[in-house]
């Protein structure tokens, strides 16, 4: 059975709130352990990263609260929408992430989910530090200033 590779790279789901709420320090790309119906739903674009976070449990990194809609053609073996999913990283990366996130104020935040050229689901996670309210206001101000400058040059 031939697989259509043209639309595999179109899936690129971003967690926009993460860059607003957190200061990104370092990023990693990890594979995701999925069931058959989950990857089919992702290829249809029915996935969300809102309010998603990661945890280190028993030297493994798990993504929690990631929404993947049930596959419309799935039968009795369809997956649950918000189940915990294991991330695939090497031991050295997992140890480094665990060591960094032991410090107070640091978190593991999913930034982006995409399908690579081989058709595998990958997730970009980051070690991040939470922004304070002042930092968030500063980010909003910088974004609005950039928009106003762009408007001035377009007209």
Image (spheres, rainbow, N blue to C red):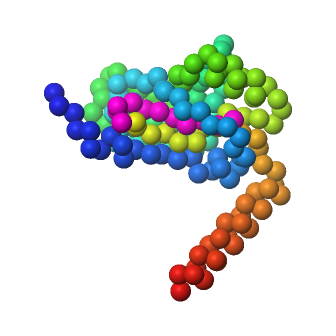
Give the percent coordinates (x, y) of residue 140: 71, 64
Give the percent coordinates (x, y) of residue 104: 83, 32
The quarter of the picture where the N terminus appears is: top left
The residue positioned 76% from the left and 41% from the top of the image is: 129
Residue occupying the far left of the picture: 1
Frontmost residue, 102 versus 27: 27
Q: Is residue 126 magenta?
A: yes
Residue occupying the far top of the picture: 58
Q: As drawn, is 68 to the left or to the right of 16?
A: left
Give the percent coordinates (x, y) of residue 151: 58, 80
Report the magenta stretch's main SS.
Answer: strand
Q: Is residue 53 magenta?
A: no
The residue positioned 71% from the left and 40% from the top of the image is: 25
Q: Quadrant of residue 138?
A: bottom right
Q: Which residues are magenta?
A: 117-127
Note whether 134 is above or below 97 in the view shown: below
Q: Quadrant of residue 120?
A: top left
**How many labels sit on residues?**
0
The residue positioned 71% from the left and 46% from the top of the image is: 22
The residue positioned 53% from the left and 22% from the top of the image is: 88
Q: Quadrant of residue 108?
A: top right
Q: As drawn, is 12 to the left or to the right of 73?
A: right
Q: Is residue 149 visible?
A: yes
Frontmost residue, 80 versus 47: 47
Q: Is residue 83 visible?
A: no
Note whether 153 is above or below 40 in the view shown: below
Q: As drawn, is 153 to the left or to the right of 20?
A: left
Give the percent coordinates (x, y) of residue 73: 27, 33
């Amino acid at each position: 059975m031939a697989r259509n590779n043209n639309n595999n790279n179109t899936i690129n789901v971003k967690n926009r709130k993460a860059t607003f709420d957190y200061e990104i320090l370092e990023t990693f790309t990890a594979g995701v352990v999925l069931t058959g119906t989950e990857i089919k739903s992702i290829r249809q674009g029915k996935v969300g990263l809102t309010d998603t976070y990661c945890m280190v449990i028993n030297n493994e990194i798990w993504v929690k609260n990631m929404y993947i809609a049930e596959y419309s053609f799935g039968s009795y073996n369809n997956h649950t929408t918000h189940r915990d999913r294991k991330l695939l990283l090497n031991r050295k990366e997992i140890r480094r992430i665990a060591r960094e996130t032991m410090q107070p104020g640091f978190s593991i935040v999913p930034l982006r989910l995409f399908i690579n050229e081989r058709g595998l689901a990958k997730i970009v996670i980051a070690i991040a530090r939470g922004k304070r309210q002042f930092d968030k206001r500063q980010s909003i101000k910088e974004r609005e200033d950039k928009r106003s400058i762009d408007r001035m040059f377009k007209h």
